[in-house]
Amino acid sequence: TTLNSSHNGVVLVSGNTTLTLPNPATVFGIRYTVKKIDSSINTLTISGVVDGVSNPQLTHETSYITIISNGNAWYKVAEHVATATTSENQTYISNSLGMTFRLIPAGTFVMGSPTDELGRGSDETQYTVTLSESFYIQTTEVTQGQWEAVMGGNPSIFSDCGLNCPVEHITWNDAQTFIVALNAMGEGSYTLPTEAEWE
């Protein structure tokens, strides 16, 4: 099956299937979400180049992938890979946007800088901090693709690495609006990290 502008939206697929991507120049701005609707070992192959990868495949463990054309190439906006039920002992978890988070165990550590550290500021006195609860933090910055998938637009200026670039040109308030929208998806409870969590 060759995708075209009439497929703009969600494409449901089952069985061993190959979907052929059209020339991105002919479908500028078109977004496809390809979703597997069976749990078998059948493989879905996307014939084309996405984010520089030729003929990516979705296995039975992959729920869906969302791609978009910028007129020159195809980029992956989001990908959901089925994972085990989240538990305190699960080191990595992912959501439907392809955001991966790593478990940071509870514990005690020292914040600040030693007095003999080169470039140390006067406000960097060392002190002990205890995080009483484990938490998850994203393994990368929020990407432009992830931001666009949630907010519907992309405020960024730098685009040399496509939708995998970190989102930029946003304010703290913009980040809070993004978090509210992300939480509305019902896949977890997200916040910005505290100073201690960021350390």
Image (cartoon, helix red, strand yellow):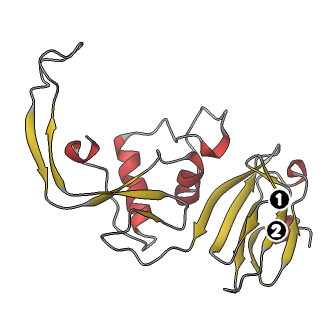
Does residue 160 appear left or right of residue 97 in this picture?
A: right
Circle 2 SS class: strand
User: Between 41 and 22, which is closer to the camera in this rendering?
Assistant: 41
Q: Please report the residue visible at 25 percent of the width from the left and 57 percent of the height from the top.
A: 105
Question: Foreground residue, 128 or 123?
Answer: 128
Give the total number of marks visible in the rendering.
Answer: 2
The reply to whether discs 2 and 1 touch (Cβ–Cβ < 8 Å) is yes
> Marks 2 and 1, Cα distance to the nearest angstrom?
6 Å
Label of residue 33 in the image: none
Left or right placement of residue 162 versus residue 45 in this view: left
Which quadrant holds residue 161? Answer: top right
Between disc 2 and disc 1, whose residue precedes?
2
Q: In which quadrant of the rendered image does the N terminus lie?
A: bottom right
Instruction: Identify the residue at image location x=13%, y=59%.
Output: 132
Relative side of 162 to 111, left or right: right
Quarter location, residue 188: bottom left
Indicate whether 30 appears above or below 19. above
Q: Quadrant of the C terminus?
A: top left
The residue under the point 56% across, 38% down is 156
Q: Residues within 10 Å of mark 2 (few under 14, many from 20)?
A: some
Say which amino acid is labelled 2: Thr
Residue carrying label 1: 55
Q: What's under tag 1, amino acid-wise?
A: Asn
> Along the horizontal axis of the image, is 79 left or right of 85?
right
Of residues 126 and 142, which is closer to you in this image?
126
Q: Regarding mark 1 in the picture, which secondary structure is present there?
A: loop
Query: Residue 9: x percent and y percent?
Result: 73, 70
Q: Which mark is residue 45?
A: 2
Image coords of residue 71 (percent x, y)? 82, 45
Q: How crowded is mark 1: few (under 14 residues within 10 Å), some or many (20 or more)?
A: some
Residue 133 percent location from the top left of the image:
19, 61
